[in-house]
Image (cartoon, helix red, strand yellow):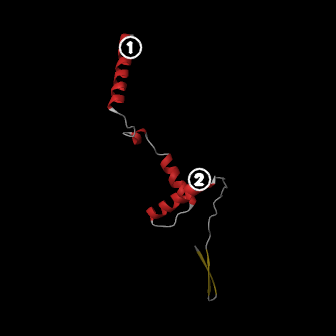
Amino acid sequence: MKILCKGNINIIEEKMKMEETKTIKISPKIYAELHAFTGLLSERLKRRVSIDDALEDLLSHAHRNKPSDFAGAWVMSDKEEEEIKESLKELWETWKRD
């Protein structure tokens, strides 16, 4: 912020950096979902949130997933677990013979 003094009049000049913006087309359904997410994010952060802020938040989560984030996400039955173990056991038996 820069204050210029001319006699008794103080003129406040604020220089804003204008970021380059891009226009994208999205379907009405996606826009509605994004708008709803913006509202949820606004409630969580307890401040107004722009669609740009919402997209930035979504993208930050998309880029930081690690394989360990998905641990326990696959719900399987005991039967499925036993089939997988048996299959792995058979594969290891084949590998040991070679």
Q: Looking at the image, which is closer to me, 98 or 90?
A: 90
Bin the neighbour count of mark 1 within 10 Å (Cα to Cα): few under 14, some 14-19, many 20 and up. Answer: few
Q: Residue at point 53% right, 54% down?
A: 56
Badge 2 amino acid = Ile
Number of on-image labels: 2
Q: Nearer the viewer, mark 1 or mark 2?
A: 2
Left or right side of 5 for 74: left
Q: Position of residue 17 (x, y in %)?
A: 62, 64
Residues tagged 1 and 2 counted as in contact (Cβ below 8 A):
no
**Residue 80 drawn above or below residue 15:** above
Q: Residue at point 48% right, 49% down?
A: 61
Q: CA distance from mark 1 to mark 2?
A: 50 Å
Q: Which residue is mark 1?
A: 94
Residue at disc 2, secondary structure: helix
Residue at disc 1, secondary structure: helix
Q: Looking at the image, which is closer to me, 64 or 11?
A: 64
Outermost residue to the top:
98
Dividing the picture into quadrants, the one containing residue 75 is top left
- Say whether disc 1 or disc 2 marks the residue closer to the N-terminus: 2
Label at residue 6 = none
Q: Position of residue 3 (x, y in %)?
A: 59, 78
Q: Which residue is mark 2?
A: 30
**Residue 38 drawn above or below residue 6:** above
Dividing the picture into quadrants, the one containing residue 77 is top left
Q: Residue at point 53% right, 57% down?
A: 54
Name the quarter where the N terminus is drawn: bottom right
**Residue 97 drawn above or below residue 32:** above
**Residue 82 drawn above or below residue 68:** above
Q: Residue at point 53% right, 59% down?
A: 36
Q: Looking at the image, which is closer to me, 87 or 19?
A: 87
Badge 1 amino acid = Thr
Q: Looking at the image, which is closer to me, 69 or 35?
A: 35
